[in-house]
Amino acid sequence: MTATDRSIELITTAAQAAADKLAHDIIAYDVSDVLSITDAFLLASAPNDRQVKSIVDEIEERLNKELGVKPVRREGDREARWVLLDYVDIVVHVQHTEERVFYALERLWKDCPELDLPADAKATRGKAAEHAKLQAEEDSVEFGELR
């Protein structure tokens, strides 16, 4: 069994919405062979809680506006560290970068096939590491100036 055309349409739209809000490391997996409850997972991350919320809001708005769907469940909204949007056919995980590293969902689903995503979404791969490196450099400069 493979993800349905509808699931792929939802994933593609959600991935583009996440990329438009500057999400990091967007990736999607076809989990239909190992889970009966959904066809696909979309993973994305952001370096702060505010951006996590912005990405989630954009995904939700875009899927509703363009495809007429609303999530049946939304979890983790209050803390904005890991927000889950359940659309039945797909599940979207938007995580704070620290949660993404800690929980490493990619390890759990690495045996599942990756779904093709829009070019903008693919271009986000490695952005979390790039951001972390820049942040470390800024922190070291700031720390050096405090001496």
Image (spheres, helix red, strand yellow):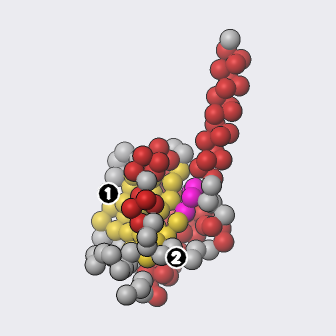
* Range of residues picked out in magenta: 22-26
The residue at the point 66 percent across, 64 percent down is: 123
Residue 61 shows in the view: no
Q: Which residue is mark 2?
A: 115
Q: Nearer the viewer, residue 9 or 127?
A: 127
User: Which amino acid, by three-letter code, is at mark 2?
Assistant: Leu
Cα distance between the residues tagged 2 and 1: 24 Å
Q: Which residue is mark 1?
A: 75
Residue 96 location in percent, x, y? 47, 48
Report the quarter where the N terminus lies. Answer: bottom left
Left or right placement of residue 37 versus residue 20 in this view: left
Residue 87 shows in the view: yes
User: Which amino acid, by three-letter code, is at mark 1?
Assistant: Glu
Residue 108 location in percent, x, y? 39, 62
Residue 42 location in percent, x, y? 46, 67
For label 1, the SS is strand
Q: Main secondary structure of the magenta part?
A: strand
Q: Nearer the viewer, residue 68 or 127?
A: 127
